[in-house]
Amino acid sequence: MSLTGSKPAGVSSLLSEPRFELMPFDSFDGQMEQLPDGAQIAVTASPQLGLDATVEWSEKAAARGYDPIPHVAARYVRDDDHLDGIARRLAEAGVTDIFVPGGDREEPVGEFESAYELLVALDDLGHAFEEVGITGYPEGHDFLDDRTLAEAMERKAPYATYVTTQLCYDPEAVARWIETIRDRGIDLPVEVGIPGVMKYQRLLNISQKVGVGDSVRFLRKTSGILGFVRQLVGSRGKYTPDALVDGLAPYAADPDYGIRGLHIYTFNQVGDTETWRRERLHG
């Protein structure tokens, strides 16, 4: 589809105020500067740097007028005291929205094995953030079967206010998954996770920065990674999510699906993604 052509209904609502996910590396500051003023920034947790870097960059982003959504990954938290300290620092920084995944570590650093355990502990400690996100898997998980994923979501849902999906490259798979969770009584709004503009060589560089094992674990969270690789190769080294966004647009315009926006996995390639987003919105 031409960037200058007409946009399907729903594209503008999806792209007007997305969340941009950034990794808490040294490049964070330069990447953040390329985002719109006041943008929502999801700050991931790094296996190498732990949650300290996530909290520190969230504090810096908040101080500069952005809206950070730190990932408080359960397997990175030592115990209740550690969790209490993290929650207090985030609240003092003005953070009102957190995302609670299990975390990519194979072995937890402390007491928390799962996001559910951490959500319960947060509640017991009396920390109440306005927004709390949990993870959804439209194309399944390489390590967990569908029943386990469904049961985990049902346990976590009472503590959450929205769901953010892992990377998915098939809009129909997203729609089917939303229909499934709605049938199970999960009515939380959905932030659909999509890749940003991806240059193959820069993606390789980021993968090396993250660590090969960590990046493989991240990418293997969704079976849809094979589709992404095929699209990346077919695009001669540069992927843009035009077809994905256009395919999601009709569902975004349908209130029965409850899609409230996009969560863009930038892999710290903000400039290319933001240029594309603005062209789609205003071209």
Image (spheres, grey):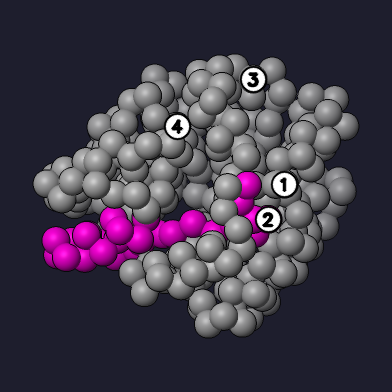
Q: Mark 4 or mark 2, which is nearer to you? A: 2
| Residue at the spot of label 1 | 224
Q: Mark 2 or mark 3, which is nearer to you? A: 2
Q: Secondary structure at mark 4?
A: loop
Q: CA distance from mark 4 to mark 2?
A: 23 Å
Q: CA distance from mark 1 to mark 3?
A: 18 Å
Quarter-of-image position of residue 129? bottom left
Q: What percent of the width, then of the height, locates residue 27?
A: 44, 21
Q: Is residue 117 magenta?
A: yes
Residue type for callout 4: Met
Residue type for callout 1: Gly
Q: Secondary structure at mark 2?
A: loop
Return the disc, 2 or 3, that comes first in the chain's sequence: 2
| Residue at the spot of label 4 | 23
Q: Residue at x 82, y 37 (%)?
A: 231
Quarter-of-image position of residue 125? bottom left
Q: Mark 1 or mark 4, which is nearer to you? A: 1
| Residue at the spot of label 2 | 139
Q: Is residue 126 left or right of residue 155?
A: left
Return the disc, 1 or 3, that comes first in the chain's sequence: 3
